[in-house]
Image (cartoon, rainbow, N blue to C red):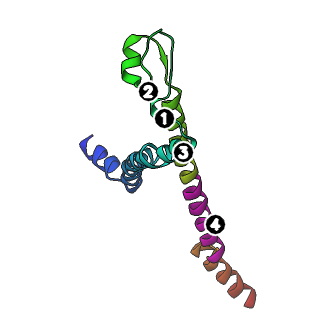
Amino acid sequence: MLKEFKEFAFKGNLIDMASGIILGGAFGLVVKSLVDNIIMPAIAGSLNVPDFSQMYYAFADGAPANDLEAARKTGAVIAYGVFINNFLNLLIVAMSLFIVIKKVIGSIAKKEEETPEEPPKQEVLLEEIRDLMKAK
């Protein structure tokens, strides 16, 4: 059983998948930082609105303005600014993934077009035998 596990764990596809997951997680953090620290402050500054992550609707009376954590302590809060940030993160990651997949599929299709399919060696040998028998 240990031998089978070792063969499974160290197959190329599994290692490739693990690398992809790790890189995907790191990419997600970079995109989140891009959205939270660059894009959303720029949009908020250009629209003269507070930081998007601090935009919310509080159901409780007397909830402080522009302090999401303090407002959550007073009662139910709809944090639509955080939702906007997360939705923008999703769009950027989805667009990036779309571009990467499109490029990978394009390169695979191009590679398949470049390399003509050769028949298996058995077929080539059988054709040679057939041709020799016809010649006799």
C-alpha span from label 1 to label 4: 48 Å
Q: Residue at x 63, y 78 (%)?
A: 124
**Sequence order check: which comes first, mark 2 or mark 1?**
1
C-alpha span from label 2 to label 3: 17 Å
Q: Secondary structure at mark 4?
A: helix
Amino acid at dot 1: Pro
Residue 116, by quadrant, is bottom right
**Sequence order check: which comes first, mark 3 or mark 1?**
3
C-alpha span from label 2 to label 1: 7 Å
In the image, the segment drawn in magenta is: 98-114
Tag 3 residue: 43
- In percent of width and height, residue 117 lies at 64, 73
Amino acid at dot 2: Asn
Closest to the camera, between mark 3 and mark 1, is 1
Tag 4 residue: 109
**Sequence order check: which comes first, mark 1 or mark 4?**
1
Q: Is residue 128 above or below residue 31?
A: below
